[in-house]
Amino acid sequence: MREVVQVKIREAGKVSYYDVNNLTPVIGGYVIVEADRGLEYGQVISEREKIVDEDIDGVLRKIARAATAHDLRQIKENEKKAFSALKTASKKIEEHKLGMKLIEVEYSFDRSKIIFYFTAEGRVDFRQLVKDLAGVFKARIELKQIGVRDEAKFLGGIGPCGRPLCCAKFLKNFEPVTIRMAKDQKLPLASSKISGLCGRLMCCLSFEYQTYKEFLKGLPKAGQTISTRAGKCKVVDVDVLNRSVSVETEDKRILKVEFNEEGKQIQTK
């Protein structure tokens, strides 16, 4: 049995479990953790929990220590260096006439590695660029091509709901989002209504999808003909959350039919 927390490595790194190592990390706090080569920094994003060894996927690394005031100053200094590195790398990309857009730069905690995140329409031969950057910064250089959703996560912004983007605020990973999710939630299918700033379907479409799927069980579909206390009727609208449908009778009256959780009609009015 191991006691662990989830830690997001750097600002844009992946989320992984780390052994608390007899420490008391708190949500939102910064920690220094073991990495492939040396140390990295990250932010604790979950409560402590216990997992058995059989559930551990791969190597479970440890939290080395809570970030000290000196560590936090170094993290801030790394951010300043990253901003300078972004400007330098952008000029190098122009010099090499590469079809890529630099989005973000991150230093590893110990400054032994610099990660450059970019977008591009296709594959880019950046081998000479890597050599140039390694010569300038005297560090290991890593270039990562990202998608439009990752770009939105890096840059942030305000969504159609008026709140900060979910991907930039709290989402750990991008889950698949389909047009079916919008249809089942009876949302308008106009692209402008269901697309995020990244141009892809909004991540929030998946948040309540499972609930909608459960509520849809036992309900007839729009256009279907069903038997009611008023006779044969055609379903013209479905109210998923209230588990009811609007139906049109043969004499063109509109009635509401309510259903219980088992899918049985309980009231017609």
Image (cartoon, helix red, strand yellow):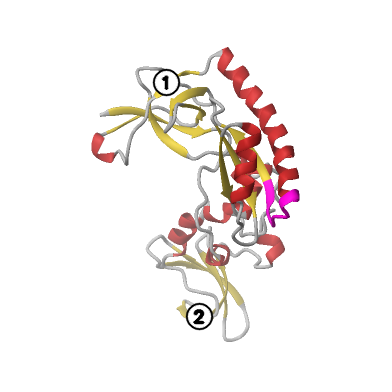
Describe residue 214's horizontal placement relative to residue 83 as left or right: left
**Residues shaded magenta:** 94-102
| 98, above or below 164, in the image | below
Quarter of the image with the N terminus is: top left
* Residue at 28 percent of width and 40 percent of height: 55
Left of 259 or right of it: where is 87? Answer: right
The residue positioned 40% from the left and 60% from the top of the image is 261
> Which of the two discs, 2 and 1, labels the residue nearer the N terminus?
1
Determine whether 27 is above or below 234 in the image.
above
Q: Which residue is mark 1?
A: 64
Residue to which mark 2 is pinned = 224
Residue 87 spot, x, y in % from top left: 74, 38
Quadrant including the C terminus? bottom right
Between circles 2 and 1, the one closer to the viewer is 1
Q: Residues within 10 Å of mark 2 (few under 14, many from 20)?
A: few
Task: Tell me the element at label 2.
Answer: loop
| Helix, strand or loop for disc 1 | strand
Identify the image quadrant of residue 109.
top right
* Membership of 110 in magenta stretch: no
Left or right, residue 49 beside residue 13: left
Q: Nearer the viewer, residue 230 or 50?
A: 50
Q: Position of residue 35 (x, y in %)?
A: 43, 30
Judge whether residue 166 can be spotted in this image: no
Furthest toward the bottom, the residue is 250
- Viewer-proximal residue, 44 or 145? 145
